[in-house]
Image: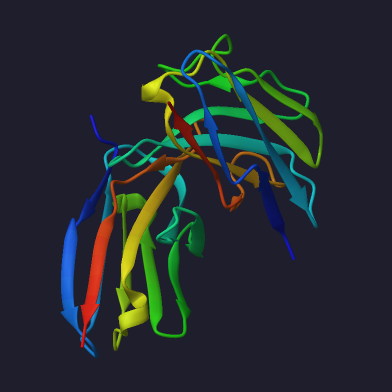
Amino acid sequence: GQQVQQSPTSLVLQEGENAELQCNFSTSLNSMQWFYQRPGGSLVSVFYNPSGTKQSGRLTSTTVIKERRSSLHISSSQITDSGTYLCAMERNSGTYQRFGTGTKLQVVP
Amino acid sequence: GALVYQYPRRTICKSGTSMRMECQAVGFQATSVAWYRQSPQKTFELIALSTVNSAIKYEQNFTQEKFPISHPNLSFSSMTVLNAYLEDRGLYLCGASWGGIYAEQFFGPGTRLTVL
């Protein structure tokens, strides 16, 4: 089954609204990473977050390893935030990253 | 900074032929390189993880016979898609890290494979 579940699958926001993206893991994990996927497909690492809260500008990531979840908060969304956000986990059994199916975010004027 | 390059960025091959893609890490030592594929309308799947001085570990549904990987040094890796068919099309990414399998990965821009 799907080891990494992301929600929502898609989201439409008006510019200036906040967004909360969720990532839940069905197995124990060692760390996780949030990515933004460009329209051409390449990945941009947003946060590498083994645990706790990290902030970068309008983005905040909170990961609670014991509860197998992570969230990505986007405040005051901008049109340029539109795109697909992926989370990926690193299991502690030696298997490398598993990706979620992504949240497609659209920010409209 | 840590950068990862991939070549080629796009490639087209005829069904049944093979194509090789490359991954180069710059600015750090890539002790681990993972290869992923994103098929159309799907998320990324891990193909295999290569760690220097260890055997390459392939995920279920991916084999060395189909996707042979070379990781000869700490800055370079290559993967070949042998006997490519329509189901092999997609975006292939390599992710490299220096701290072992639990360190942050840095990704290349990907090689987009089209199979005719």
**Quarter occupied by the C terminus of chain B:** top left
In the foreground, A98 or B63: B63
Q: How is the image coloured?
A: rainbow
Q: Is residue B74 above or below residue A60?
A: above
Q: Quadrant of residue B37?
A: top left
In the foreground, A25 or A65: A25
In the foreground, A3 or B96: B96
Q: Is residue B11 above or below residue A71?
A: above
Q: Is residue A87 left or right of residue B53?
A: left
| Residue B101 location (% of width, % of height) | 61, 39
| Residue B79 location (% of width, % of height) | 64, 27
Q: Is residue B70 left or right of residue B105?
A: right
The residue at 80%/42% (across/down) is: B75
| Residue that sits furthest to the top in the current view | B65
Q: Is residue A39 left or right of residue A67?
A: right
The residue at 38%/61% (across/down) is: A63
Q: Is residue B105 above or below residue A93?
A: below
Q: Quadrant of residue B50?
A: top right
Figure disc tally: 0
| Residue B33 location (% of width, % of height) | 65, 37
Q: Is residue A34 above or below residue B103?
A: below
Q: Quadrant of residue B67?
A: top right
The residue at 30%/40% (across/down) is: B42
**Quarter occupied by the N terminus of chain B:** bottom right
